[in-house]
Every structure is written in C-alpha cells, then in structure tokens.
C-alpha cells in the first residue's frame, strides 16, 4: 500500500473516530424518559380544535387580516413585536416580529409568527384550567373575557376576568417584557360553597401547510427541554398518532423554526405532564398539564407560566436562562453535534461584528484569527509536506525499484522518512482540526439570526444565502442549478486548486486523478452553501497558500 494512500485512509479513519468521540463525550441528546403515567385522567387533556378550519375547506381559508376582524382584540406592542390578543378565549394568535422582514425587498412585510384560527396555517397559544368535574364550568376557547385594561405593553399589563355563574371567578393577568416573553398569571377565586380541584394547562397549536417544514440543516418542528434533556420531533414522527408524553419539573416545550420559535416555560417548582401530539389533519400540538390545585371555599389559588414567541436571539435566550431560570433555553437554537464549538464561534463572530460593524468582515477576521491559532500546527504540517515534495523523486525511484517487493518497499520508505526527518501522517492533522471547525461554522451561518440578511461588500446582501451572482444571473443563459455557480464559489475552487498544486503529488495515477478532481468536487458541493461560509473558506485557502509558499521557500522547494 502506497504511503499516500495510507495517509488518506488514516485521515478518514481518524476523522470518523474524532466525530464518534465528540458524540460520546458531548452527546446531542440524552436517553429518552420512559413514558409516564398521565398526571390526570385522559379526558382532561387540553384540546383546542373547537374552531379550526376543516381540511376540506382550505380553499375558503381567511387571510390574517380578515380573521382578525372577526373578534374583539387587545393590542400588543413593544419595540420588537406587534399584534393582538383575541379576547374570546384569551388566545395568543397574532404576533408580528417587527425587527425582521420576510425578504430583502424594501417593502417586505414583517415576519408573521402566530396567526389566527380559520386562516390557512393557524398557529396560536392558549392557557386555562381543567377539571375532572364535568359539571364545573371552565373558561375555554369561546369564553368572552371582561377586559379591565386596553393595550398590552411592557409598561401596561392587562387583566381579564370571567365569572362562571357558579360562584367561581377566573382572573388572568398578562404582562410583556421588552423582548418576546409574556408572563401569564392565572387566579381562581372560589366562592362556590365547596372545594374544587383544578389543573392548570397551556398549549401551542399549529397547522403545517402541506407539512412542508423539514430542513436538512436545522431542526424544524416540535421541541422542548424535558428534565434537562432536549427532545425534538419532526411532525412526521407523530403522524402515526402516538402521543409523546413526559413528566417533568421545569423545562419548556413548543415549536421551532430556523430563526423563530414559540415555547411555554414551565414552573420550576411543580411537576407537569408535557405532551407532543398530532390532533388533526396537519395539526400538531405541544401542551402541558400541571399539578392539581385544590381550592377550598372562600380561598384563592394562582398558577403562573411564561410564554415566548419570537426570534432565536442567542444572547437573549441565555439571559432568560440566567434571569428566569428557564432550563437550557438556548437549545431552542440547533447548535448541532459541536455545541462546544458552535456556540463560542457565534459569540466570537458576534463580538467581531459589533467591533467592525459588518458581518462579512467579521467572518474574514475570524478566519484570520483561526489561522493564527492553528499556525504552529499548520507550520509543522506544511514543513512535512514541503519535505515530502522535495524528496518526491526519491520516493518515486524507491517505488519503481521495489514495486514487486512490498516488505522491502516499506523498509526503504521508512528509512528515507527517518533520514529526511519526515512524518508522512502530519499532513492529516490540519484536516482533522478543520472538520469540526468547518461543520461548526457551517452551523453558525445557518442558525444564527444575527447573520440572516446580513450584507457584505458588492453583490452579497445576505451572508446566510448562496452567492446570487451566478453564471445564469450574469449571462442570462438557462444553466442547470447544479452548475450555476456564483463568483465566490469559483474563487474558492481556484484557491483550492492552487493550494493542491503546492502539495506533494500522489504517486498512484488513479489517486492523483482523484485528488485533481477534489477542487472541482468541492466547488460544486459548496457552490450553493451560505456565501458567508464560502467567503471564509476562500480566505482560509489564501492564508494557507501564503503560509505554505513561505515554508516551501524556506525548505528549498520550488
């Protein structure tokens, strides 16, 4: 077996081992909790299907604007969100994220997160009480609450009241912070003449339009942290009708998309039954039922939870974990296997961005700093590769002389390496380091909302999107999508080709042809990745070429 081939195989094997070790030491998911017994009877499971649009009537679906006109509402507003709370049912079903636009167009509308029932894709949250006593009247999705305040803002919470006519008064106090977090306090005043037992609940209900929500890069679907363990479910995981139930103290549950999510943050001092389920056609629900609360006659009981509906701003999520005690709230962001690298990379990029003011230049500076950190390791590798290139004629001569005697060939090769002080495996080390770095940066550029719609110089208006200056865009020719490359991917391929020409050539002709194709393969493979990642890779190649060329000159290799 040729030394070059052994080096290639060693790199592949060591890479696999490195990935396996990472997964063992820093697992992305912990063992699933066994399915618990329900906290309450099955018939008390919260449902919110009372006013959903039947699937067969989708063509009659209302626009959000028309649906909002059907009910009285409480306006919601702060510096980051706008929308309204439906008074009937006290339902959160209308939230726009005013910091973020749907597209790069100047007149693009704000991102719509929550939307009302009877629209094409309803998405809302609801809270209340449950009871095993069927005669007890409880507020539901059709309850018309009495509102004592007008507008919900960080400075003006609202209070809703409803009397069930049986001597029980329900009060709901809702407040909003300066970001995306609502606090819901439910109060029950019992003057019914007898003790009652109630269970607090909350749910988030969502219809996926044609269930087209999957992403190969980022988890999109139902998720939560249950007993400090991340749980993630694609809608298709629930399509067979099996409900995923867990018993947890604290944690959170909800729905996540690439850049936005909604979640109910559970009480850290009580035990809740958390559930993820499919409850209808393309309709999915994340809900919880809390511990039973017995309220004697003449007494008052309260239950509180937090409800989040907004963007995945990582620093803010960390603040919520610290200040509100929401367990691992940052895991709403899909950091992937390399969490221990991905999250620090984000904070470094974010720091550089605030220092420079442009995310593209921050990525380039990050690439330069990373090369600086790896300089000693890369130096040794390039020295070894340069020496290998220098003795290439001797290696070819030995291979030709002893091509029929494998044992002698290996002995002569090892003697040459020892004499020239060459470690043929040292060239694999930068590759092994680059693998987790590459995937971690790839994740950051795909998950961090701070990079969404972030511009660079020239034609790059969104570093999280592929390079738009493609061959078809420049020529107007109908180019197949796979071949329709942008300027930056082509530059990356050129720099990779130059870098390869500086490396020792494999003696095996088939292997040499394979390596010659690598720049082409990588160019097309990365051609449709986020432009920020391609820009990083291009500069990294340029810095490697400079470093490698200096070392070659020092060693005496042309």
Image (cartoon, rainbow, N blue to C red):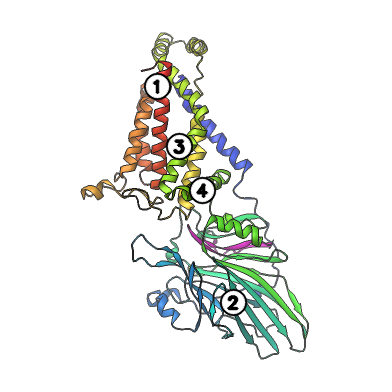
Mark 4 residue element? helix
- Find the distance from the CA under tag 3 to the CA under tag 2: 49 Å
Q: Nearer the viewer, residue 46 or 22?
A: 22
Give the number of the disc on residue 51: none
Please tell me which residue lies in front, 34 or 339: 339
Distance between the alpha carbons at the discs numbered 4 and 3: 15 Å
Q: Are marks 1 and 3 in contact (CB under 8 Å)?
A: no
Dot 1: within a 10 Å radius of its alpha carbon, few (fewer than 14), some, or many (20 or more) residues?
A: some
**Quarter that holds the C terminus:** top left
Which is in the foreground here, disc 2 or disc 4?
4
In this rendering, the answer to whether 84 lies above or below 164 is above
The residue pinned by badge 3 equals 368
Alpha carbon separation for disc pair 1 and 2: 71 Å
Query: Which numbered dot is residue 157?
Result: 2
Measured in 3D between alpha carbons, the distance from the residue under mark 1 to the one under mark 3, in whole angstroms, is 29 Å
Residue at which label 1 appears: 506
């Amino acid at each position: 077996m040729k030394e070059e081939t052994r080096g290639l195989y060693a790199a592949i094997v060591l890479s696999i081992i490195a990935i396996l070790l990472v997964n063992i030491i820093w697992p992305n998911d912990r063992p699933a909790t066994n399915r618990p017994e329900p906290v309450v009877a099955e018939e008390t499971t919260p449902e919110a299907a009372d006013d959903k649009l039947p699937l067969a009537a989708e063509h009659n679906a209302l626009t959000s604007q028309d649906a909002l006109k059907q009910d009285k509402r409480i306006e919601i507003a702060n510096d980051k969100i706008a929308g309204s709370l439906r008074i009937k049912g006290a339902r959160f079903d209308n939230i726009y994220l005013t910091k973020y636009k749907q597209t790069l167009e100047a007149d693009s509308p704000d991102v719509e997160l929550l939307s009302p029932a009877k629209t094409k894709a309803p998405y809302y949250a609801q809270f209340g009480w449950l009871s095993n006593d069927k005669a007890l009247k409880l507020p539901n999705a059709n309850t018309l609450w009495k509102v004592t305040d007008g507008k919900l803002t960080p400075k003006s919470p609202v209070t809703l009241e409803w009397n069930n006519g049986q001597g029980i008064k329900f009060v709901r106090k809702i407040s909003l912070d300066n970001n995306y977090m609502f606090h819901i306090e439910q109060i029950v005043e019992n003057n019914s003449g007898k003790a009652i037992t109630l269970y607090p609940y909350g749910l988030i209900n969502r219809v996926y339009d044609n269930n087209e929500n999957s992403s190969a890069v980022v988890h999109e679907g139902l998720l939560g942290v249950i007993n400090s363990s991340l749980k993630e479910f694609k809608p298709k995981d629930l399509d067979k009708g099996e409900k995923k139930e867990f018993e947890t103290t604290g944690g959170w549950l909800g729905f996540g998309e690439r850049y936005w999510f909604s979640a109910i943050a559970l009480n850290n001092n009580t035990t809740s039954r958390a559930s993820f389920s499919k409850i209808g056609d393309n309709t999915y629900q994340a809900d919880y039922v809390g511990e039973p609360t017995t309220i004697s006659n003449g007494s008052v009981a309260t239950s509180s939870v937090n409800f989040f509906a907004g963007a995945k701003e990582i620093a803010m999520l960390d603040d919520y974990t610290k200040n509100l005690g929401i367990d691992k709230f940052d895991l709403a962001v899909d950091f992937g296997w390399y969490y221990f690298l991905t999250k620090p990379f984000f904070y470094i990029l974010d720091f550089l961005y605030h220092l420079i003011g442009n995310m593209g230049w921050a990525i380039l500076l990050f690439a330069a700093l990373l090369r600086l950190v790896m300089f000693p390791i890369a130096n040794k590798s390039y020295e070894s590769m340069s020496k290998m290139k220098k003795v290439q004629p001797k290696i070819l001569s030995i291979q030709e002389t002893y091509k029929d005697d494998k044992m002698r060939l290996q002995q002569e090769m090892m003697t040459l390496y020892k004499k020239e002080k060459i470690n043929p495996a040292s060239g694999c080390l930068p590759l092994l380091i680059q693998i987790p770095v590459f995937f971690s940066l790839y994740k950051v550029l795909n998950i961090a909302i701070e990079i969404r719609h972030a511009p660079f110089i020239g034609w790059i208006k969104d570093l999280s999107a592929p390079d738009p200056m493609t061959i078809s865009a420049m020529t107007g020719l109908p180019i197949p999508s796979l071949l329709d490359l942008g300027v930056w991917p082509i530059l990356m391929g050129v720099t990779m080709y130059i870098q390869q020409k500086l490396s020792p050539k494999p003696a095996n002709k088939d292997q040499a042809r394979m390596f010659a194709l690598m720049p082409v393969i990588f160019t097309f493979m990365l051609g449709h990745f986020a432009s920020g990642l391609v820009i990083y890779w291009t500069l990294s190649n340029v810095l490697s070429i400079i470093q490698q060329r200096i070392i070659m000159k020092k060693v005496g290799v042309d």
